[in-house]
Image: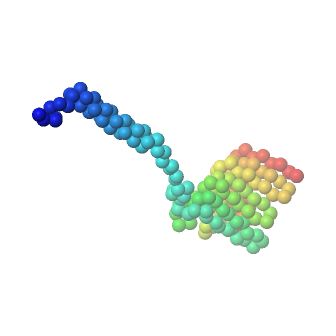
Amino acid sequence: MNFFLHINRKLLILFGIIIIFIFILIIFFKQININGIEFEYTKNPYSDADISEPKFAINNESKKIYISATKGNFLNDEEVLLKDNVKFKSNDFSIETEKVIFNRDRQTAQSKTKSLFKSKNATISSNGFNIYDKGNKIIFYGKSYIILK
């Protein structure tokens, strides 16, 4: 007599179902593990900038005004758009704003964003400013608030 003829069909079907069930469980848990993986997306903060952490200076006869920002983009050969945490510093004052167009040849700067001017005796909050005449003159735009000490 043949051994394979004595195998119980019900036992063989049950064994097959158990193997298929285990196989499905393995695939299911692998899928859960793949879906559970979180990819960390880090964007390069300077990817949309031509210049990272630009630094410039406005020079005149009596003082230097140092300009720094987080990022900048060239608008043309003369002008640079400075963005994010733009700071103007000299021995006499400082100005903080978010966007400035700086002309390297004329050494002028214009901003139409909220700006904060601080000096030893005054604080000015405005909606923009214009620095011209190599930093000797500053005009503040929009609603401006002045606090004198």
Q: Point out residue 116 in the picture as x, y percentages from the top left corner.
A: 74, 52
Q: Point out residue 138 in the picture as x, y percentages from the top left corner.
A: 73, 58
From the viewer's perspective, tell me whether residue 134 is left or right of residue 81. right
Identify the residue at horizontal 51%, vertical 57% (top origin). Answer: 47
Of residues 83 and 7, the one nearer the viewer is 7
Residue projecting furthest to the left: 1
Task: Say whether residue 13 is visible.
Answer: no
Residue projecting furthest to the bottom: 61
Of residues 30 and 113, the one nearer the viewer is 30
Identify the residue at horizontal 52%, vertical 56% (top origin). Answer: 44
Residue projecting furthest to the front: 1
Task: Say whether residue 3 is visible.
Answer: yes
Identify the residue at horizontal 42%, vertical 43% (top origin). Answer: 34
Q: Point out residue 30 in the picture as x, y percentages from the top left corner.
A: 39, 41
From the viewer's perspective, tell me whether residue 106 is left or right of residue 7. right
Question: Which picture quadrant has residue 59?
Answer: bottom right
Of residues 142 and 11, the one nearer the viewer is 11
Examine the rendered structure and indicate whether residue 67 appears above or below residue 29: below
Question: Which picture quadrant has residue 64?
Answer: bottom right
Question: Which picture quadrant has residue 71?
Answer: bottom right
Examine the rendered structure and indicate whether residue 47 appears above or below residue 13: below
What is the image's colouring? rainbow
